[in-house]
Amino acid sequence: MEKLFVHLIRRSDEYFELAGLSEDKRLWFSLPDEHKNLYEHKVLSSKTTIKSAIAAIKPINGFRKIGIKLDEDLKKEYFDEDGNLSYKNYPLQESVVFFDVGWTAVRKAYTYKYLGGSLIDYALTKENLCLEVESDSTMSSRINLIVMGLPSQVQDELDREDINTIKKLYNELRKLDGQYNKRSKENKPFDNRSDNKYDPIIQKLPSAIKLIQSQGFIGETHRVVTEDGYILSLHRIPYQDRTKKYKGPVLIHHGLLGSSDLWLLRSREDDLAYLLADQGYDVWLGNARGNTHSRKHISLKTKDPKFWKFGFHEFGYYDLPASIDYILNKTNEKQLFYIGHSMGTLMTYILGSTRPEYNDKFRISINLSPVYFLKVRNQMQATMVEGMNSFQQTLERRGIFEAFPSSEVNLKIIRMICEAGFSIEEICLETTARFLGWDPKQTPLHFIPHLLKHFPMGTSTQTLAHFGQIIRDARGLKPFDYGTEKNLKLYGDVKPPLYDLSKVTLPTAMYYSRGDFIVNTKDVRQIAKLLPNLVGVYEVPKKSFNHNDFLWAKDAKELVYNDLIKLINNF
């Protein structure tokens, strides 16, 4: 008799989670977080066997694994046309579920699922690993896996206050890593199922979560799947100081070649993300497709040229709405605050003009160094713009579709140049300041090597070419220009149309500076005239304040952040 097996977990007195589906109890598939509420699954929750199981799951986080006769209603709900498990056309991801207790489960996961590699690496690259243990067992046996790198639903099972248990877990993991090193010396084969497992871009850099934790906060990583299949990472500093009033979710987004790391590099007293968390906000940090933290797709590998076929349009049309919907669903809110820098601002113009239903999901959008018009400001920029298209074509002819990835090679070059001595450091600072747009007087010399470990973080060659196109065409922001033939197919015209700012009705406030080497003051004023729901335009009271000083200038807090926080606190 055919059955559908379901894995149920009781999360509260009234909330039951559908954690997994299986056809044979050996291979399990997890549902996305937004579809785990059992009562959303009306066909399933109406079954008598499920109701009986719910009655039998007494403790919080207790679980049951149930087999149900597979009828036509269940087939229609949980299988696609090819007979594969799915839900609402969402491709379910493999999830390993164990019911062993304590360290036996940890060791079994290691040997069963990841022969030849470390359990830590596995947890960092496979977010769907899920170990369940008996909820009424002793504390030492309730540790599921590791503290770092696990999905939030597994982290929730860990009692973070039990220091001795965490120490024991750490010691066990060191033993497992010892096994990993032994296997490596013996040249045992590695498991190549994960595209990013041995990617040096992933392995060699400090994680955003470590940066968050270094400042005394709890950090979380969440995975978001876009409509076109890209898997993005959202880093979160959840609301945790219960002495502060909860103020709602805020999404902060980086600019070109950046990542969530750029909001986390200094200290709790200096960086905007930490300042907002201390104010009582639920802080979410976005990552655009293709950067270090968002190098996955449900079907494409990073070595596939199709993976890199994206530009600014895809960031605004796919990435931003996917992140917004995930955050609002996770927090049960209808609106969020948004703060974007540079490219993070034009994403809102693309979204608001092409998907106007999202305008109502913003309480306010704060634009730091807003980008819609771009003009050449100096000879270096002119040279860069002229070379953008040929740069893309040259690289792609050689099979290279990624630009400026973060890598170990970059780190070595940075150390050689920027840590060679005081005079060399000054040269490094001046050179990078001219290229990346910050005031050298605002940035301590010792900060540069640390910064350049987290910047640039990679994007597609098409994105850089798109950047060049916007500068060459002074009319403003528009989709990617593919040439006459393809433009006619996509846009119905030989040239791509401008994004219509009159449709961007979300409340917007803009901060700009006269010293910005990318964004012209006149351009900001022109944007202000075109936006129909402008809250205000604020000039940074320092003429030398540059483009990226919004991120890491030593007095960014005094010049920008304090006023920005007052603005959203009162909105």
Image (tube, rainbow, N blue to C red):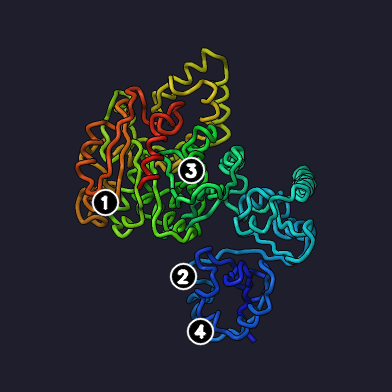
Question: In the rendering, at what x and y percent does residue 522 appear?
Answer: 22, 32
From the image, state whether disc 4 or disc 1 is nearer to you. 1
What residue is rendered at 39% in x and 56% in y? 335
Which element type, helix, strand or loop, lies under badge 1?
loop
Is 207 drawn above or below residue 33 in the view shown?
above
Is 105 drawn above or below residue 403 in the view shown?
below
Determine which residue is flagged by label 3. 279
Disc 3, disc 1: CB below 8 Å?
A: no
Which element type, helix, strand or loop, lies under badge 4?
helix
User: What's the CA distance linking mark 4 and mark 3?
Assistant: 49 Å
Q: What is the three-letter code of the residue carrying label 1? A: Val
Determine which residue is flagged by label 4. 73
Image quadrant where residue 553 sits: top left
Is 325 drawn above or below residue 509 in the view shown?
below
Q: Residue furthest front?
A: 243
* Neighbours of disc 2 within 10 Å: few (<14), some (14-19), many (20+): few
Q: What is the three-letter code of the residue carrying label 2? A: Asn
Determine which residue is flagged by label 1. 504
Which quadrant of the rendered structure holds the N terminus? bottom right
Disc 1, disc 2: CB below 8 Å?
A: no
Determine which residue is flagged by label 2. 89
On the question of residue 527 being in view, the answer is yes
What residue is rendered at 32% in x and 42% in y? 466
Q: Is residue 110 left or right of residue 125?
A: right
User: What's the CA distance linking mark 1 and mark 2?
Assistant: 31 Å
